[in-house]
Amino acid sequence: MKVCEIFASIQGESTYAGLPCIFVRMTGCNLRCTYCDTTYAYDEGSEMTVGEIIDAVRSCSLNLVEITGGEPLLQRDACTLISGLLDLDFKVLIETNGSADIGEVDRRAIIIMDVKTPGSGVSDSIRIENLSLLKKSDELKFVITNEADYDWARAVVRQFRLSEKCTVLFSPVYGKLSPAELSKWIIADKLPVRMNLQLHKYIFSPNQRGV
C-alpha cells in the first residue's frame, strides 16, 4: 500500500472532533475537488505492508484511528488493513469521497462519506448505491462553498431523508464561507444537520501538515 503519512493529532472533523486520533493518510485520489487541502496526497508517499502500517499505528498508543487520503478505498488492501485494526480493538473511521464502493468495508468500521456539492466541481462523482449501505453509526459530510451549494445540499438531505439514515454534517470551506453564515441558513431552515468545522485548522496553522 502507498502511504502518504501517519501521524497523531486532534481529530478535527465529524462527531469525533476534539479527540486524540491516529491518521493514516493513503496516497492517491480519483477526484480533484476545487477546495482540496491535501493535494500533496495525490502522489507523495512510500510503499508499506499492512503489517508495517499496523505496527506504526500501534506505536502511537491511541485507540482512535482514521484511514483517510486522498481516497483510501482505491488501495487494494484497504479492507484488509481496516479489518486488521478492528481485530486489534481499534476504533476505525474511514474518510471516503463517496465515489468508491463501501460495500466491502468491514461493518464494524465507521464510514464518514462525502457527498460532493456543485462547488466541488465533482458533484456527479457519488456512487449513489452507497447511500443504501450506510449504518446509523456512519456519517455523511457536505462541504459547502456558497449559498447555492447549501440549497443543493438541503434538497439532497430532504429528498433522500438522509438525517434518518445517519448523522449529516455540513462543513463550510475554510476561508471561503463563514461558519456564522452557514449557521444562519441551517437555523432558519431548522435543518437536522450538524455544523462541522475543521477544528485542526483553528488549533494549528491552516496549511500545516501532520495535524
Image (cartoon, rainbow, N blue to C red):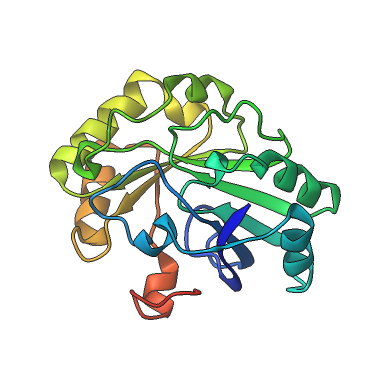
Image height check: is 84 above or below 134?
Answer: below
Residue drawn at point x = 79 percent, y = 57 percent: 51
Image coordinates of residue 198 in percent, x first then y, are 40, 63
Image coordinates of residue 168 in percent, x first then y, are 44, 39
Seen from the viewer's position, the closer of residues 147 and 99 is 99
Residue drawn at point x = 31 percent, y = 56 percent: 36
Q: Is residue 45 left or right of residue 202?
A: right
Image height check: is 127 above or below 61?
Answer: above
Seen from the viewer's position, the closer of residues 173 and 126 is 126
Q: Is residue 202 left or right of residue 96?
A: left
Taking the view exactly as shown, the residue that stands out farthest to the front is 47
Taking the view exactly as shown, the residue that stands out farthest to the right is 88
Image height check: is 175 above or below 186?
Answer: below
Residue drawn at point x = 30 percent, y = 46 percent: 32
Image coordinates of residue 211 in percent, x first then y, are 49, 74
Report the number of numbered marks: 0
Res. 56 image quadrant:
bottom right
Image coordinates of residue 39 in percent, x first then y, are 35, 60
Residue drawn at point x = 63 percent, y = 42 percent: 110
Q: Is residue 133 left or right of residue 97?
A: right
Q: Is residue 63 visible?
A: no
Res. 141 image quadrant:
top left
Q: Is residue 55 visible?
A: yes
